[in-house]
Image (spheres, rainbow, N blue to C red):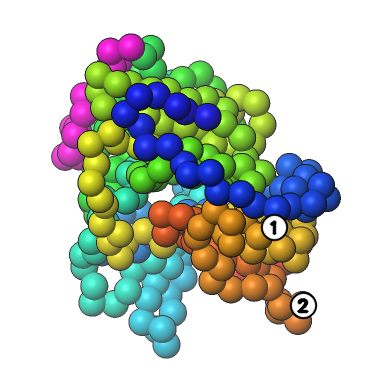
């Protein structure tokens, strides 16, 4: 747990879980499936992601009856890779991203080269590629055409270049506890930068954050509040047993905060449970088998 002077520390909230319930999230077969968000210009966004990030357009479909078009992009098939699921609603060309959602992360073996090419194509670099005092990680920041921030992280080869989703949080230790208990994640790495005024914790599965996708929880010492916005929607993850997962989530939200939004129904084609974390970020846990069947139908 991060426990530095100046940080807001989670209150002593207690949740009562029996051993089987408590161990389920760690035993479950979980994976980051997709990040879902809205964009104001779908074709321009697709062009930006494919040309600048090297993503592939995996599928695109128009839904005239719902007045929207949806596209999925990533670095490999949805069956095995984390992807972005972006939606354009007819007639809406701009959204408020707010300040709660921070950025997505893209891993690249040469952040300088990628940033240079993006600049040549007219992209907006908001932080030049380099290191930060007290850290060795080489990174840079840029904005996509919709105003979403992307961090370019220089690192070696990785099977998952779409490697981060970063949230601003108001109580970092409470958030760590929530993602440990509700989703079975663990802290893969944490940093505290008092001089820069922030601390972060990388939450995920496995042992090496450079080889997987993580949620980066970021706490700013001087922050007094954040705005939610209406652009970013949710993070979708997989589970082998959505009903057991829902039981855990219910207990954790009752004990640590957050809110259950929906519960799974046995008769549903795609069984899932949806919930908010203590800061209002939405997560959906989707049944693994149903997810794969859903992909077959869409293809």
The residue nearer to you, when weighing 10 against 91, is 10
Residue placed at 61% from the left, 35% from the top?
Answer: 186
Residue at the disc numbered 1: 248
Q: Percent x, y for residue 170?
A: 36, 45
Q: Is residue 247 left or right of residue 91?
A: right
Q: Which mark is residue 266?
A: 2
Residue 251, quarter of picture: bottom right
Report whether residue 58 is seen: no
One can see residue 40 in this view: yes
Task: Answer whether residue 78 is magenta in the image.
Answer: no
- Mark found first going from the N terminus, 1 or 2: 1
Indicate which label's residue lies in the foreground, 1 or 2. 1
Q: Position of residue 51 (x, y in %)?
A: 34, 42
Task: Give above or below for 229 relative to 158.
Answer: below
Please tell me whether mark 2 sits on a helix, a strand or a loop. loop
Residue 192 position by quadrant: top left
Q: Quadrant of residue 95?
A: bottom left
Check if residue 122 falls in the magenta segment. Answer: yes
Q: Nearer the viewer, residue 5 or 249?
A: 5
Residue displayed at 30% across by 59% down: 228
Q: Quadrant of the C terminus?
A: bottom right
Q: CA distance from mark 1 to mark 2?
A: 17 Å
Boundaries of the magenta span: 119-134
């Amino acid at each position: 747990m991060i426990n530095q002077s100046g940080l807001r520390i989670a209150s002593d909230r207690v949740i009562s879980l029996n051993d089987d319930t408590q161990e389920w999230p760690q035993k479950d077969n979980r994976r980051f499936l997709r990040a879902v968000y809205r964009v104001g210009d779908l074709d321009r966004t697709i062009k930006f992601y494919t040309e600048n990030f090297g993503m592939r357009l995996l599928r695109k479909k128009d839904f005239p009856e719902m007045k929207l078009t949806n596209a999925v992009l990533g670095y490999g098939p949805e069956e095995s890779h984390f992807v972005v699921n972006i939606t354009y609603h007819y007639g809406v060309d701009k959204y408020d991203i707010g300040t709660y959602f921070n950025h997505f992360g893209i891993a690249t073996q040469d952040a300088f080269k990628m940033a240079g090419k993006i600049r040549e194509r007219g992209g907006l670099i908001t932080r030049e590629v380099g290191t930060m005092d007290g850290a060795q990680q080489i990174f840079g920041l840029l904005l996509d055409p919709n105003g979403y921030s992307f961090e370019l992280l220089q690192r070696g080869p990785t099977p998952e270049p779409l490697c981060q989703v970063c949230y601003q949080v108001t109580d970092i230790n409470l958030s760590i506890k929530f993602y440990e208990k509700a989703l079975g994640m663990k802290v893969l790495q944490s940093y505290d930068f008092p001089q820069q005024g922030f601390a972060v914790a990388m939450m995920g599965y496995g042992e090496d954050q450079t080889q997987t996708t993580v949620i980066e929880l970021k706490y700013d010492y001087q922050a007094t509040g954040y705005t939610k916005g209406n652009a970013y929607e949710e993070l979708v993850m997989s589970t082998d047993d959505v009903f057991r997962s829902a039981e855990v989530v219910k207990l954790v939200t009752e004990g640590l905060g957050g809110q259950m939004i929906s519960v799974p129904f046995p008769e549903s084609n795609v069984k899932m449970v949806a919930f908010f974390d203590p800061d209002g970020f939405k997560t959906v846990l989707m049944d693994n088998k149903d997810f794969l069947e859903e992909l077959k139908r869409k293809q």
